[in-house]
């Protein structure tokens, strides 16, 4: 990696220290989590940080815990592999565990963190749609103290978030959800693994016990707009309705109209829209079928439902 | 032939200890004392004159030892046409072409110095498909083409930018079409793909300032050919050049010819004797080394209602990229059998290798066969469907069998094609009913090998009875060291553990043509066998007097010689050599093997009475379904039946087939080096250039067919290349069978299949 | 500006002077001279550079030296137990799991870690675990076979160990 100036490397052990180093250091500083995005940017895009603040030695930032109210808090430095295999996540929201498992390889997921994945604000980040479909919130800590916001409001554009200089994404908060909430994440890509999402769709549903009407609906999309997004129009199609194949198809069509994909070397915008349509339908129907955790091989085959 | 003890058995590889312990030294790993680090500045323009190039600031940068451009290395090279400069001279012809290079004390410094090089370009019209590059009026990518030094096989064409025109003329296709009940014409396209060997490219070079000796350390698949090319380019005698081959982390054709060698040598001429290492990272390997030819193939066929093929007319445009590299011979050897392994009375083929402003295309496992097969083997199914014939039956009616005279004028022998067809089909239950939505398809090929060529070998026996094979075949992962060890062990009747293969150094090892074209088992196998027999004969000659027996009474067994019926009195090889030749003597057997073909290829008709030492035959059959809502192809299973002549190592044969099929599946479903309308590679990474991963493959069913070739060692033919050749066509046929619609362009990505389905359904 | 970094490499305390931005892969290969760990892509897409970092397999091409203080690193050179092959190495030899061998060190490290987590895997489990390790030679068939055979051998040894208790 080309570099003529030395890289200052900081390893704070507290949040306050991390923020202070960043504010004192001024422009050219980068927080380092798993490094799977930052190091590639340094190698491929010619990014030359003046200094790096490694967050991995701050103990409070890692781990997954259940709150008294039934919510789940995931520390930002929790690796995607930890999310993928966490019994709590796998048991409660298997589609969230699966979305983590869709990122890169085990080697990557042993390094990449859920907070880094969000803070990097890649439109195709697999975990983002699953978290958005769970109405997740982001907790940030900075010089001005802490703040909590809706995760969807955290993203500003490709690679951009609302975090202020020195402000650190510390936790992702999944509010308590209805015990009957079910969900599904479908990553659509040509290879079965080791690919970026050409599109990603996460849905959650709560179906009434009596008549199976949709009491809650969330549809979130990845890789089809500058930030991971919710599809409110598609959600409205279903809310209060009994989910049928026709309605799922209709919601898929609506979602494909709401998104704003680009054409690139991976896919045309038109194909992305078509895949949003099909996979939103499938995700809804699969979610409603409501199965627990599934091994990856079954997950793969569910895309062919 | 007595019973084979080592040959024909699934011996484990002889080179694997160092590979599982991390001690193997590949080219990329090699560190030389006092080594400098070279980095390369690449062209950012697809076709432009270099108006100005200024290296001064780079030269003055601290830590830089030298900076060079084309003017400092005024040499050209090329296998058939000497058209390629060491570094761009006067103009650039593709984005990624090496323009200048720097050697410095470390890589970071060299990289930094590249930024100080100023290059001014003046753009020229650029062409990104072979068809547009050869249109009348196109600007010449090589203005000096006429004046280049060329091999005699080069045939020009009255079109711009054509570096080779292959012609095959048999019968009268117009008459053939008249006699046909059905005539069908279609076009097919195969995109640019890359070898993507796991080890990226590198080369080390050193020039002795006193003697002028040039030493190159490089994982090249044909070190002797490279040596000749270097000597010719530099105008030096061959003894002034030495190539040393460290281990090679895969090649598949990408590591032949000269790639980084000219850059490393060019720098080494300016470092006062210090060695220079040039390494390309993955992105540089993608944009600047070598790719496979894209090809547009037009096929017109005439057939009788009973399925008899009458005529085939083919035009192939091979996109050669900016330099000719191996385009002329890919064009010849890929176009010649492109009508398929069938009896066809009337055949007309025109193959054009065309310069374009894209990365250079060259040898790639299969050497032109996959492109032709993608067209012809799909075309066969399109004909079969219209004839309402089963595709297997249609092929069986027309395929080459023993004694047939092929359309290029050669009588064929030992043709295992029919057996590969029936076995591959049976392995996927061809005759059994298919579930709804499932398609099946098959494709068959024949492939020639580069002929005539020579291999030499030596076999050393020392006083410990240790056997050392001297062979110029390069271990590129294909297992040649194991095969050649088996041959030597077999002929000298020793355990294979007693055999080693010497490291490859052109100063020590006798000449071999190349490790290409699936030629090594056959040619070098014969040479090593001959050298081992020569050593054995010398041992028997010594043993006769020592054991007081006649030659016919002597038995060689387990590294010893004894008299028939008296194995209690046996002399070890080592003991005999000590007694006869001396305490630390080495006995050496030598042999040379050349397969002389008959008449040279007739450049006007494409005819030859013996174009290849042997032919490889293969059939693959695929079963697939398609997710019609997304376009994703799902492969269920794929059988691959290959006529290998004789499996010297069945384990290795299966490994070659499985690996070849995996590459074939990649090229069928995923691989496409996307080069945009400005000539820039858009996906130069493993993130976006999709090799198959372990989860992207179906069940692969390898089938070994042994239709012995009497001239080959123990009956062996070759197997290195065909594994991937029929795969895309077999899959294409299965997909067409599943979706009742034909896709004629690779790869069959979900998006491509999706739009084909939309078109089929009139959306 | 180099700094002294101390860590454990294949069980041995190691100390090197290297700049913080140096990648672990380059540190191993260029500074320490241990070249068993391979570079295939440099971007985390091929797995050839897989090593153990603090007990977990990671791509060494994406780890900065600055992070390595007190780390525990194991590379392919640390796989053998004295003169004895690790069962994964033995299985790769017996089954033909290596052809050109360039992906092999990364494959071995990943397979070892995977079998520690899942001693009795299905073929599909193995394929899933190895999907981040590209191989261009084998089509993965013999690699999966080798990992299965290594798993069986490791289970046999574990069973034996229990018998003795």
Image (spheres, coloured by chain):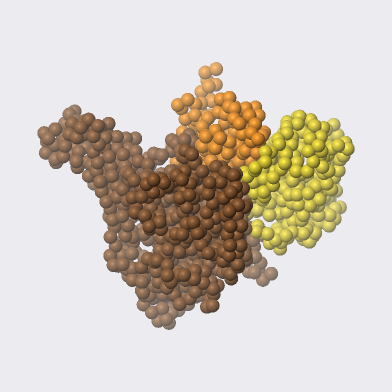
Chain colours: A yellow, B brown, C orange
Q: Is residue A282 visible?
A: no
Q: What residue is at 14 percent from the left and 40 percent from the top? A: B551
Q: Position of residue B443 (x, y in %)?
A: 46, 61
Where is residue A211 drawn, in percent x and y?
84, 49
User: In the displayed structure, does residue B116 sit left or right of residue C139?
Assistant: right
In the image, farthest residue toward the top? C165
Judged left or right of residue B632, residue B365 is: left
Point 74% across, 46% down: residue: A120
- The front one of A192 and C4 is C4
Q: Is residue B84 visible?
A: yes
From the viewer's perspective, tell me whether residue B157 is left or right of residue A220.
left
Task: Give left or right: position of B644 versus B144.
Answer: left
* Res. A4 image quadrant: top right
Which residue is rendered at x = 67% and y = 45% of the image?
Answer: A42
Question: Which residue does the image show at 53% across and 30% down from the upper left?
Answer: C78
Q: Nearer the viewer, residue B196 or B55?
A: B55
Q: Quadrant of the C terminus of chain B?
A: bottom right
Give above or below for A11 relative to C134.
Answer: above
Q: Nearer the viewer, residue A107 or A176?
A: A107
Residue A175: name its quadrant: top right
Task: Please say if B697 is above or below B672.
Answer: above
Residue C86 placement (x, y as % from top left): 49, 30
């Amino acid at each position: 990696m080309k570099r003529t100036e030395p890289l200052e490397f900081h390893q704070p052990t507290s949040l306050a220290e991390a923020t202070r180093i960043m504010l004192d250091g001024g422009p050219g500083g980068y927080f380092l989590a798993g490094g799977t995005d930052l190091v590639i940017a340094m190698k491929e895009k010619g990014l030359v940080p003046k200094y790096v603040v490694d967050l991995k030695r701050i103990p409070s930032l890692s781990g997954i815990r259940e709150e008294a109210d039934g919510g789940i808090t995931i520390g930002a430095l929790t690796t995607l592999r930890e999310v993928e295999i966490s019994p709590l996540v796998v048991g409660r929201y298997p589609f969230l565990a699966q979305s983590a498992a869709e990122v890169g390889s085990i080697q990557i997921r042993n390094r990449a963190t859920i907070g880094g994945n969000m803070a990097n604000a890649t439109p195709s980040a697999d975990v983002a749609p699953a978290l958005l479909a769970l109405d997740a919130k982001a907790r940030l800590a900075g010089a001005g103290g802490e703040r909590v916001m809706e995760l969807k409001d955290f993203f500003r554009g490709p690679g951009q978030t609302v975090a202020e200089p020195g402000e650190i994404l510390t936790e992702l908060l999944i509010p308590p959800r209805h015990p009957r909430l079910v969900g599904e994440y479908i990553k659509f890509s040509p290879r079965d693994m080791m690919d970026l999402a050409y599109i990603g769709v996460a849905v959650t549903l709560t179906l009434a016990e009596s008549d199976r009407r949709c009491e809650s609906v969330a549809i979130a999309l990845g890789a089809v707009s500058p930030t991971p997004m919710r599809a409110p129009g598609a959600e409205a199609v279903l809310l209060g309705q009994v989910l049928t194949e026709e309605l799922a198809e209709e919601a898929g069509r609506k979602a494909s109209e709401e998104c704003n994909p680009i054409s690139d070397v991976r896919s045309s915008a038109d194909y992305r829209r078509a895949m949003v349509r099909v996979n939103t339908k499938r995700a809804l129907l699969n979610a409603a079928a409501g199965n627990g955790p599934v091994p990856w091989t079954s997950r793969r085959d569910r895309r062919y439902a | 032939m007595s019973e084979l003890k080592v040959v024909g058995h699934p011996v484990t590889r002889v080179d694997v200890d160092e590979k599982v312990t991390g001690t193997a030294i590949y080219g990329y790993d090699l560190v030389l004392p006092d080594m400098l680090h070279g980095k390369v500045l690449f062209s950012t323009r697809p076709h432009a004159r270099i108006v100005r190039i200024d290296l001064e600031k780079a030269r003055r940068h601290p830590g830089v030892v030298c900076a060079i451009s084309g003017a400092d290395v005024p040499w050209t090279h090329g296998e058939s046409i000497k058209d390629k400069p060491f570094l761009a001279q006067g103009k650039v012809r593709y984005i990624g072409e090496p323009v200048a290079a720097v050697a410095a004390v470390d890589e970071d410094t060299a990289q930094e110095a590249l930024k100080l090089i100023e290059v001014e370009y003046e753009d020229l019209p650029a062409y990104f498909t072979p068809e547009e590059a050869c249109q009348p009026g196109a600007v010449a990518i090589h203005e000096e083409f006429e004046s280049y030094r060329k091999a005699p096989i080069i045939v020009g064409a009255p079109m711009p930018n054509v570096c080779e025109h292959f012609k095959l003329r048999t019968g009268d296709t117009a008459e053939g079409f008249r006699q046909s009940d059905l005539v069908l014409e279609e076009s097919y396209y195969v995109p640019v793909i890359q070898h993507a060997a796991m080890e990226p490219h590198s080369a080390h070079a050193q020039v002795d300032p006193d003697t002028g000796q040039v030493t190159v350390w490089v994982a090249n698949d044909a070190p002797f050919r490279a040596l000749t090319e270097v000597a010719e380019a530099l105008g030096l005698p061959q003894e002034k050049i030495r190539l040393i081959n460290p281990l090679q982390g895969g090649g598949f054709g990408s590591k032949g010819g000269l790639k980084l060698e000219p850059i490393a040598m060019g720098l080494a001429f300016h470092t006062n004797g210090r060695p220079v290492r040039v390494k390309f990272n993955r992105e540089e390997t993608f944009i600047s080394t070598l790719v496979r030819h894209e090809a547009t193939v037009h096929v017109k066929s005439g057939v009788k209602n009973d399925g008899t093929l009458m005529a085939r007319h083919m035009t192939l445009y091979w996109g050669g990229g900016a330099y000719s590299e191996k385009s002329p011979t890919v064009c010849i050897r890929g176009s010649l059998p492109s009508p398929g392994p069938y009896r066809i009375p009337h055949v007309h083929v025109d193959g054009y290798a065309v310069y374009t402003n894209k990365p250079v295309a060259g040898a790639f496992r299969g050497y032109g066969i996959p492109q032709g097969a993608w067209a012809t083997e799909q075309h066969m199914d399109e004909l079969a469907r219209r004839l309402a014939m089963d595709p297997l039956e249609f092929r069986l009616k027309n395929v080459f069998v023993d004694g047939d005279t092929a359309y290029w004028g050669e009588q064929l022998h030992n043709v295992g094609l029919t057996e590969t067809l029936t076995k591959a089909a049976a392995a996927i239950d061809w005759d059994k009913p298919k579930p709804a939505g499932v398609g099946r398809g098959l494709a068959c090929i024949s492939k020639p090998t580069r002929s005539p060529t020579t291999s030499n070998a030596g076999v050393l026996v020392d006083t410990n009875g240790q056997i050392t094979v001297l062979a110029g075949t390069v271990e590129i992962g294909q297992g040649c060291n194991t095969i050649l060890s088996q041959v030597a062990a077999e002929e000298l009747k020793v355990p294979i553990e007693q055999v080693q293969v010497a490291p490859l150094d052109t100063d020590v090892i006798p000449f071999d043509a190349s490790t290409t074209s699936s030629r090594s088992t056959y040619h070098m196998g014969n040479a090593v066998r001959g050298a081992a027999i020569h050593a054995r004969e010398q041992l028997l000659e010594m043993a006769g007097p020592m054991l007081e027996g006649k030659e016919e009474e002597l038995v060689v067994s387990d590294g010893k010689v004894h008299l028939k019926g008296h194995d209690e009195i046996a002399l070890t090889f080592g003991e005999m050599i000590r007694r006869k030749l001396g305490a630390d003597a080495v006995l050496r057997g030598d042999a040379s093997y050349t397969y002389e073909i008959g008449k040279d290829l007739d450049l006007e008709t494409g005819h030859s009475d013996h174009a290849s030492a042997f032919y490889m035959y293969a059939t693959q059959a695929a079963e697939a379904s398609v997710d019609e809502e997304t376009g994703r192809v799902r492969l269920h299973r794929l059988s691959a039946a290959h006529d290998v002549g004789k499996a010297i190592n069945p384990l290795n044969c299966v490994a070659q087939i499985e690996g070849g099929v995996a590459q074939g599946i990649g090229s069928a479903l995923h691989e496409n080096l996307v080069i945009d309308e400005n000539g820039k590679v858009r996906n130069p990474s493993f993130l976006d250039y999709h090799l198959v991963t372990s989860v992207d493959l179906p069940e692969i069913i390898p089938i070994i067919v042994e239709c012995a070739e009497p001239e080959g060692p123990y009956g062996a033919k070759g197997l290195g290349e065909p594994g991937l050749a029929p795969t895309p066509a077999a899959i294409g046929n299965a997909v067409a069978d599943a979706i009742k619609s034909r896709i004629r362009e690779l790869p069959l990505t979900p998006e491509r299949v999706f739009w084909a389905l939309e078109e089929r359904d009139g959306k | 500006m180099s700094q002294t970094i101390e860590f454990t490499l294949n069980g041995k305390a190691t100390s090197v002077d290297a700049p913080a931005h140096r990648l672990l892969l380059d540190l191993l290969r260029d500074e320490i001279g241990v070249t068993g760990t391979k570079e295939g892509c440099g971007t985390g897409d091929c797995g050839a550079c897989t090593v153990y970092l603090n007990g977990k397999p990671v791509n060494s091409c994406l780890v900065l030296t600055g992070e390595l203080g007190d780390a525990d690193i194991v590379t392919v050179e640390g796989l053998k137990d004295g003169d004895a092959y690790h069962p994964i190495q033995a299985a790769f030899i017996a089954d033909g799991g290596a052809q050109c061998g360039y992906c092999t060190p990364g494959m071995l490290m990943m397979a070892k870690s995977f079998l520690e987590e899942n001693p009795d895997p299905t073929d599909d489990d193995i394929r899933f675990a190895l999907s981040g390790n590209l191989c261009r030679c084998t089509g993965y068939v013999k690699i999966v076979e080798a990992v299965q055979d290594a798993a069986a051998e490791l289970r046999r040894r574990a069973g034996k160990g229990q018998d003795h208790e």
